[in-house]
Image (cartoon, coloured by chain):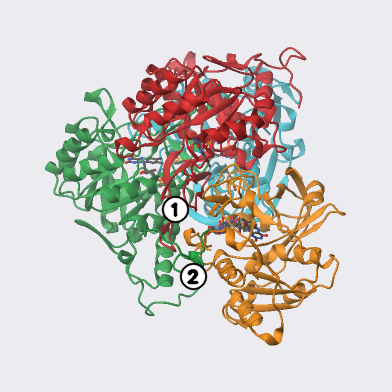
Chain colours: A orange, B red, C green, D cyan
């Protein structure tokens, strides 16, 4: 359906961990049309500071209630300003945007979900939707972050209702190492008898690169939710490009994450042509 | 709030005449910030627009620069899109069929790396139904002159304009870059070479770096700054240009509200283009038209043309004609 | 937060060498934003500053432009002070006696309307105790050349620099204007003419109007834009200048935090000047020094000079050397 | 005393009329040194929107409690942002700045106080200080605004404890016309037997000009609190100039309101050389 601009009332807004917040918005038109993996462009406040909207995935979609939830992590000015918005205020959204995940026909295909950091956000809705498909759910979530405090609280993740494998880079919770390493080891181990028929992932580009290597090596279906800096979110600025073999109709060197994505198959991205992307500055500085 | 001036029931006249180009109102979208129009469907009333200026078009499709292509700055945006576009043929065959039925004047922003490319583009667009004007983006490197930007040299600017002028019967707009010592000089060169209209400004040359990775934030190193941050620069350029030439001028740069647009009109621009602000709020152009209407009503003006260029730069000493004024010590 | 790198107890070395000018740290105040220093007494630790650059000084006192002289803009400030100052004699007799005992290098920003005025100023300041350098403000109209701004022409810039160079044994800094087509060209002219150091940028030519009174917001019509809005422009200028000349460069424009200052240093500036940000927070220079120190500690660098100019503009494809990278389609 | 930068806690913050707010701040160092007629430069929030500090006079000074009060009127972005600051937050102040009013030696000299619009702000503290001088208070306040809703509520003004004469340009409250006209008529009327020995005034420049004409014509002592756009407030930017015969030590064409003022005698300003100053945009537009 068409994207719309909607003024959404904040229903609740709570801090779920040191740097992660959950925001529930009344947004009847957007929630009615939203699909898992799609996103909104949210204006955190009027004025010029910050100037641009910020993209956020749907954490949950409640079309009956006309509501959506967004899960976000403090990254910089925009998310900081957002974190101070009180319930009852309104926030200006544009959405739903992007392609979203394609659901499998059946819940029983072995599905691996891989999330890095705040990449967990779109997974919750995806899991909920897959769970409602015919067949016995056979999905596993591999969820990593730099350190334990950057993970969602365990109780929330357990509520997703599928087996979860945690990893932290510093070993402070779950597996000690990268989540993609955990995933590789788990699938390699025959005893686990888990050979994913499809991989859905969301997280930083460096993580996605390892996911891409794995799915290409194992010739597995994949849906990677990729990030890029965005000015418009609607395909107008051409700012959110990634090197790729575009859809047939656009035989160009780049795809636009907001329009052709954010979900891509691993093979469609030209990983070797990706230049260094900015990463958030270390949080220890200039707070 | 109700208006309390002006004849009831008569909305102010927003139409403007820019030489050969008539617009129903002075608010257009700026090239590269509005795609090919369709991207904003459902988000803004396309048919209300004075004109749609589409993304810069070249002869052949261009992939654009590698990402990262964007950096947000205080009240601004740096972009280094690298003029990615579908090329003139697909523009005509794929994009125009959407734009034509809207009934809104379409202005095609064109660019090339040689004078011939500009000329060929102009020829190719001439006679295509629905196109109201071409806008020449001269902020491009001339590959035959060591990559010097056309628009930074009066001579090269004039040659591009002449070449386009020869190949088209459409109104020709030349879009000036602010990255010059004297924009008035370039403006005069473009006008003399046959440009019907001038528009300014294009983006301001800028840069951003990441202190942690120690690398530029744009793969292209340099980019162009736009948004509210540049408005004071743009306004100064429009002032200089309107005083240097006789032809009509379109104001561009940091416009995000009716007040911003009115500033450019006051200085002498006959119309404006809204760029970066579309990203922030796709409805901004409509809000600007509403605001201008309201302003005219409250000020008791029946037409925007009565306001355009009415800036008063004479000295004004409110307390000088009076007894007290002689009491200087 | 504690630092967890670098040898304990050894604060990083912030000293920088700019040709003949040695500074204990790279953070100075920018001319015209710090008065003659005393204005900030009690509000900031003057003695910690790398240097104090005082308000621009002319031969005779100047009253400056009529007000209004200021306009606030998005993330910026336009000023048209008109170089109001006490004149070189009162500067030496009244202002220097306060500055001298501080023990902080004083850099005197000078301007004139003829080359002779610049030369006389340089001569007058030569040998005055406490003065560490002169900074030539070339963003002034040359009354003998129809009011053309010295700094927009390489030839005129060179003549001013030569004139000052001849009259002083002090280090000579030339402060470049961004309002030119090629700042690199002006930079090379200033360097060749004997400038030991270049600083950039001065303010960006700008304007603001009031849509209600239909008048310019500045009595002078034009003013200079400064503040965070211009930082991306300034950074680009510093990049171009550092790559055009061999002499050291001072970065100026929109610096309001340690991160901002580090961006200029990364690009290649050997020191920075902080202007408009002093108005917003008089303690900003100290915060910048603290932030730079902390940054060096965390990055494991023992001296700021190891960071200056380390920008890496080579292409970097993190995923290119790998098996996966060959899978291009 | 020296100006200082102080982080002041908001003790209370209330809306006293449609566009006027009262802000009480804990600011021990500034309140200890502040004089009536001086001002602070207040940073309404961090960030760039707005960029600069805003000047505000002291409405009340409570040195014993270490507190000050500011009375302000919504004018634009800065005051709008300020109006949303919650009690308990801190605001960054620089002050006390400027010269302040000189108190008469004795409360009994006939004193006319003239305030236009939010120019009422510094009057309250001035009155309080004069009231504590020896002698019987003989001051009158002439207080005008464009319309009744832009006046402080009458009960607050009556509490100042001196006779008050109200005027509104539209006649919606008190005298129908300019406050300076009311003042002229009142003093001209012999029956009122009020010949001010000194006039203290605060308000827009156009009002001050009429005050200046009167005091010069009547050869009366005057202290006019003048406004100007300010970037620094401390004499560093030279932005707040007004044409004047400067203090003897500065034989220049301009004085700086923040440093040499904001209080000036009427005769020291070269009124005929003042160029049009910006006035706030009509509030009906672009709200
Ligand atoms: C399609 C999409 C969906 C997203 N969904 C979510 C979500 O559900 N929850 C969530 O917390 N975040 C999500 N993000 C990321 C989120 O948009 C950024 O964290 C946010 O824009 C940062 O804004 P800021 O002003 O706080 O930080 P900024 O000050 O803008 O940036 C802080 C740092 O983050 C980096 N950064 C900024 N934007 C991005 C980006 N888009 N991608 C990668 N790095 C970035 C910057 O380079 C900078 O170093 C999503 C991004 C995209 C593109
Ligand atoms: C010494 C001094 C003391 C002051 N004391 C008080 C006080 O006690 N209470 C109070 O409410 N206000 C006071 N003011 C005025 C106050 O500073 C301005 O109203 C405020 O800065 C407006 O900020 P803003 O961001 O809300 O409006 P802006 O958006 O900055 O401006 C809105 C409109 O007001 C005009 N304006 C802005 N600043 C000034 C100014 N300084 N003088 C005149 N017009 C201006 C602008 O031109 C613009 O048209 C004082 C000003 C000075 C110089
Ligand atoms: C993302 C982006 C892409 C742009 N692409 C073009 C373009 O293709 N051709 C052109 O002439 N100008 C282009 N511009 C410049 C704008 O048309 C406009 O001149 C400039 O952004 C200043 O206006 P603004 O501040 O309202 O954005 C682009 C600007 C942006 C932000
Ligand atoms: C109010 C004001 C006055 C200035 N006066 C001078 C001056 O006298 N001489 C000069 O060379 N630059 C002057 N400048 C320019 C600054 O020194 C500086 O180059 C410019 O403001 C950019 O830096 P910033 O963005 O940090 O302010 C002035 C700037 C401002 C804002
Ligand atoms: S964010 Fe503008 S095209 Fe994708
Ligand atoms: S406000 Fe800066 S000198 Fe007065």
Q: Chain of mark 1?
A: B
Viewed as shown, does residue D158 lie left or right of A249? Answer: right
* Mark 2 beta carbon near ligand 1 (under 8 Å): no
Write down the quadrant of residue B279 in the picture: top right
Q: Is residue A220 above or below residue C97?
A: below
Residue C218: tell me if it is visible: no
Picture coordinates of residue B290, whole percent (x, y):
69, 27
Pointer 2 residue: C323
Q: Are marks 2 and 1 in contact (CB under 8 Å)?
A: no
Picture coordinates of residue C229, whole percent (x, y):
47, 44
Picture coordinates of residue B46, whole percent (x, y):
68, 30
Out of B278 and A246, give the one closest to the viewer. A246
Out of A134 and A181, give the one closest to the viewer. A134
Pointer 1 residue: B219
How far apart marks 2 and 1 lie (CA) works out to 23 Å
Label 2 Cα neighbours within 10 Å, binned few <14 / some 14-19 / many ≥20? few
């Amino acid at each position: 359906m068409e994207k719309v601009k909607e003024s959404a009332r904040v229903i609740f807004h709570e801090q779920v961990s040191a740097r992660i917040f959950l925001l529930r918005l009344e947004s009847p038109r957007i929630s009615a049309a939203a699909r898992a993996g799609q996103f909104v462009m949210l204006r955190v406040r009027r004025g010029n500071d910050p100037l641009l909207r910020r993209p956020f995935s749907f954490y949950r979609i409640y079309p009956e209630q006309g509501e959506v939830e967004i899960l976000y992590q403090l990254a910089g000015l925009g998310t900081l300003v957002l974190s101070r918005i009180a319930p009852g205020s309104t926030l200006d959204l544009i959405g739903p945007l992007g392609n979203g995940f394609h659901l499998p026909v059946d819940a029983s295909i072995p599905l691996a979900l891989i999330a890095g950091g705040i990449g967990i956000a779109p997974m919750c809705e995806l899991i909920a939707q897959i769970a409602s498909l015919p067949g016995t759910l056979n999905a596993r979530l591999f969820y990593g972050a730099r350190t334990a405090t950057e993970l969602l609280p365990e109780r929330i993740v357990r509520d997703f209702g599928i087996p979860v494998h945690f990893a932290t880079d510093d070993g402070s919770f779950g597996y000690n190492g990268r989540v993609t390493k955990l995933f590789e080891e788990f699938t390699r181990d025959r005893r686990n008898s888990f050979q994913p028929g499809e991989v859905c992932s969301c997280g930083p580009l460096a993580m996605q690169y390892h996911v891409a290597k794995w799915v290409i090596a194992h010739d597995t279906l994949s849906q990677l939710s990729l990030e890029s800096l965005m000015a418009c979110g609607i395909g107008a600025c051409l700012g959110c490009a990634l090197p790729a073999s575009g859809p047939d109709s656009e035989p160009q060197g780049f795809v636009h994450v907001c329009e052709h994505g954010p979900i891509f198959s691993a093979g469609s991205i030209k990983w070797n042509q990706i230049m260094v992307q900015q990463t958030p500055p270390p949080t220890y500085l200039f707070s | 709030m109700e208006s309390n001036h002006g004849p009831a029931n008569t909305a102010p006249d927003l139409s403007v005449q820019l030489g050969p180009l008539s617009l129903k109102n002075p608010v257009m979208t700026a090239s590269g910030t509005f795609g090919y129009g369709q991207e904003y469907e459902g988000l803004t009333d396309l048919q209300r627009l004075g004109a749609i200026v589409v993304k810069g078009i070249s002869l052949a499709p261009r992939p654009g620069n590698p990402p990262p292509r964007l950096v947000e700055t205080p009240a601004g945006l740096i972009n280094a899109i690298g003029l990615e576009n579908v090329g003139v043929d697909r523009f005509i065959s794929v994009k125009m069929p959407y734009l034509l039925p809207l009934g809104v004047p379409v202005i095609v922003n064109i660019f090339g790396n040689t004078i011939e490319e500009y000329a060929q583009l102009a020829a190719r667009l001439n006679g295509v139904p629905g196109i109201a004007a071409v806008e020449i983006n001269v902020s491009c490197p001339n590959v035959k002159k060591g990559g010097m930007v056309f628009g930074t040299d009066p001579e090269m600017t004039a040659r591009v304009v002449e070449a386009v002028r020869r190949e088209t019967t459409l109104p020709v707009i030349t879009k000036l870059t602010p990255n010059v010592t004297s924009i008035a000089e370039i403006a005069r060169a473009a006008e003399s070479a046959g440009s019907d209209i001038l528009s300014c400004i294009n983006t301001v040359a800028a840069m951003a770096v990441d202190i942690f990775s120690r690398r530029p934030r744009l793969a292209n190193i340099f980019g162009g700054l736009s948004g509210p941050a540049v408005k004071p620069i743009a306004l100064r350029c429009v002032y200089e240009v309107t005083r240097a030439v006789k032809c009509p001028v379109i104001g561009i740069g940091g416009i995000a509200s009716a007040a911003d647009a009115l500033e450019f009109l006051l200085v002498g621009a006959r119309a404006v283009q809204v760029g970066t602000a579309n990203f922030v709020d796709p409805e901004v152009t409509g809000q600007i038209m509403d605001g201008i209407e309201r302003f005219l009503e409250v000020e008791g003006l029946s037409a925007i043309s009565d306001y355009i260029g009415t800036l008063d730069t004479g000295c004004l000493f409110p307390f000088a004609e009076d007894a007290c004024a002689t009491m200087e010590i």
